[in-house]
Image: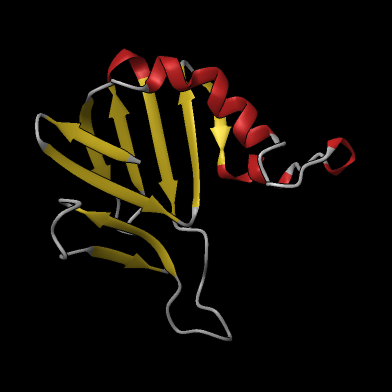
């Protein structure tokens, strides 16, 4: 996700579970990606509910302003947007038997800057 204000753009790269909802209705989740429709030629990974749902709301969510950001002690994030949209980003891995740290999300305060804030499981 990119966030822009005038000439400044920041970016949030999400590798864990997220959902976008509005008025108590779930609109998009990262789990929607796993609903591939192989029978209808899903060769590029876009014939699934994630892309379908994103296409149906993209014109409503683009241009919204972030009005509030909350983070709990587990580092889950709730982004509140104008027009009553909310994005929840939830840590979705416990400690792995194979890796000590699994990246959940990464915030780049400025796309041009090399400093990142990385959150692990």
Q: Position of residue 60 (x, y in %)?
A: 42, 14
- In this view, 10 is above or below 84: below
In front of the other: 98 or 24: 98
The N terminus - image quarter? top left
In front of the other: 90 or 62: 62
Q: Position of residue 54 (x, y in %)?
A: 54, 28
Q: In this figure, which colouring scheme has been used for the structure? A: secondary structure
In front of the other: 4 or 25: 4
Q: How many marks?
A: 0
Image point (15%, 54%), residue name: 112
The C terminus - image quarter? bottom left
Image point (45%, 84%), residue name: 100
- In this view, 115 is above or below 67: below
Residue found at the very far left of the displayed protein = 7
Q: Is residue 18 left or right of residue 81?
A: right
In front of the other: 45 or 81: 45
Q: Position of residue 72 (x, y in %)?
A: 30, 51
Q: Is residue 119 left or right of residue 88?
A: left
Image point (20%, 51%), residue name: 111
Q: Position of residue 75 (x, y in %)?
A: 32, 57
Give the quadrant of residue 68. top left
Give the quadrant of residue 27. top right
Residue found at the very far right of the displayed protein = 39
Image point (15%, 65%), residue name: 115
């Amino acid at each position: 996700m990119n966030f822009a204000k005038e000439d400044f753009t920041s970016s949030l790269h999400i590798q864990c579970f997220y959902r976008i909802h509005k008025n108590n209705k779930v609109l998009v989740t990262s789990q929607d990606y796993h609903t591939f429709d192989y029978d209808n030629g899903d060769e590029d990974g876009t014939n699934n509910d994630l892309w379908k749902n994103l296409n149906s709301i993209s014109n409503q969510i683009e241009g919204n302003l972030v009005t509030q950001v909350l983070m709990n002690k587990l580092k889950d994030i709730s982004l509140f947007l104008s027009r009553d949209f909310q994005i929840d980003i939830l840590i979705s891995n416990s400690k792995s038997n194979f890796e000590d740290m699994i990246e959940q999300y990464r915030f780049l305060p400025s796309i041009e800057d090399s400093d990142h804030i990385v959150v692990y499981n």
